[in-house]
Image (cartoon, rainbow, N blue to C red):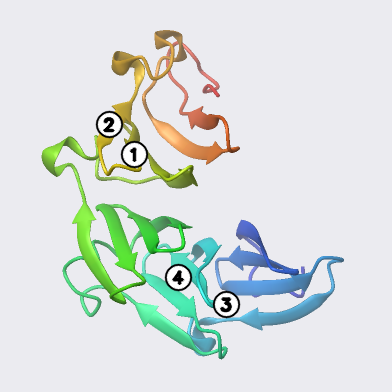
Amino acid sequence: VVHLPALNVRVLRRIGDEVWAGTDGGIGVFTLDATPVRQYRPADGLPSAPITDIVTGVNGQVWVSSEGNGIARRNADGTWTGFAAPAAGNNFLSNQVRALAHDGANLWVGTAAGLSIFSEASSTFVFPVTTQGGQLPDIRVNDLALANGSVFVATPQGVAVRSPANQWSTLRRATGGWPSSTGSDFARTIAHDGTHLWIALADSARQPKGAL
């Protein structure tokens, strides 16, 4: 515990041959046998807010999101670059970032106001994804998953799916996405195992302990 920047660990990710532990006060980095390696704190370039997610990018980069102060990228040379509203531009929807996913071409940024997208090709945030045109059923993004060229977006009103052809649809009870007996469309977190999409649903009157 003494090797962590703060006690409350919110996310654990394997990054190469290391494990990164995101906390309320920064990131603790460990070897695979749990030997402490280093810490990253706001003074090093991290967002000064609880860490919510960590993903690898391209060229040795690592992206980190926070609950209230945007995101940061650790560059290959070890320096950090921060992105936060309003400086990051109108396409960066919110500093409340809940989830990240990287597909090799784009960084998908799930926020409290929709889905922002950082294009590696242009090194800019491109036009975001919201409820406009029925792309998302709810702007509040809870989690993200990628698989087989598709993007899955967990929201309180179901799971939005972007196909490889850039077509959007929504999984929820009314569309046959999952049984009505689950009692909820509120997708808290999701994961894809390469074949199946796993969805953790919030508790409801029909399922007081939630459903999977």
Could you tell me residue 5's position as x and y percent? 64, 75
Q: What amino acid is found at the position of numbered circle 1 in the picture? A: Ser
Please determine whether, in this image, residue 181 is positioned above or below residue 49: above
Could you tell me residue 168's position as x and y percent? 26, 37
Q: What amino acid is found at the position of numbered circle 3 in the picture? A: Gly
Whether tag 3 and tag 1 are in contact, CB under 8 A, the answer is no
Whether tag 1 and tag 4 are in contact, CB under 8 A, the answer is no
Task: Determine the image quadrant of residue 103.
Answer: bottom left
Q: Nearer the viewer, mark 3 or mark 1?
A: 1
Q: Mark 1 vs mark 4: which is more N-terminal? A: 4
Please determine whether, in this image, residue 128 is positioned above or below residue 138: below
Judge by depth and name the residue closer to the eye, 8 or 92: 92
Judge by depth and name the residue closer to the eye, 67 or 196: 196
> Which residue lies under the disc numbered 1?
163
Q: What amino acid is found at the position of numbered circle 4 in the picture? A: Ala
> Which residue lies under the disc numbered 3?
60
> Which residue lies under the disc numbered 4?
49
Residue 162: tell me if it is visible. Answer: yes
Tell me the SS state at disc 1. loop
Q: Nearer the viewer, mark 1 or mark 4?
A: 1
Whether tag 1 and tag 2 are in contact, CB under 8 A, the answer is yes
Q: What amino acid is found at the position of numbered circle 2 in the picture? A: Ser
> Which residue lies under the disc numbered 2?
169
Could you tell me residue 91's position as x and y percent? 20, 65
Q: Residue at x 40, y 71 (%)?
A: 71
Q: Mark 1 vs mark 2: which is more N-terminal? A: 1
Q: Mark 3 vs mark 2: which is more N-terminal? A: 3
Q: Residues within 10 Å of mark 1 (few under 14, many from 20)?
A: some
Tell me the SS state at disc 4. loop
Residue 4: tell me if it is visible. Answer: no
Q: How many marks do you count on the picture?
A: 4
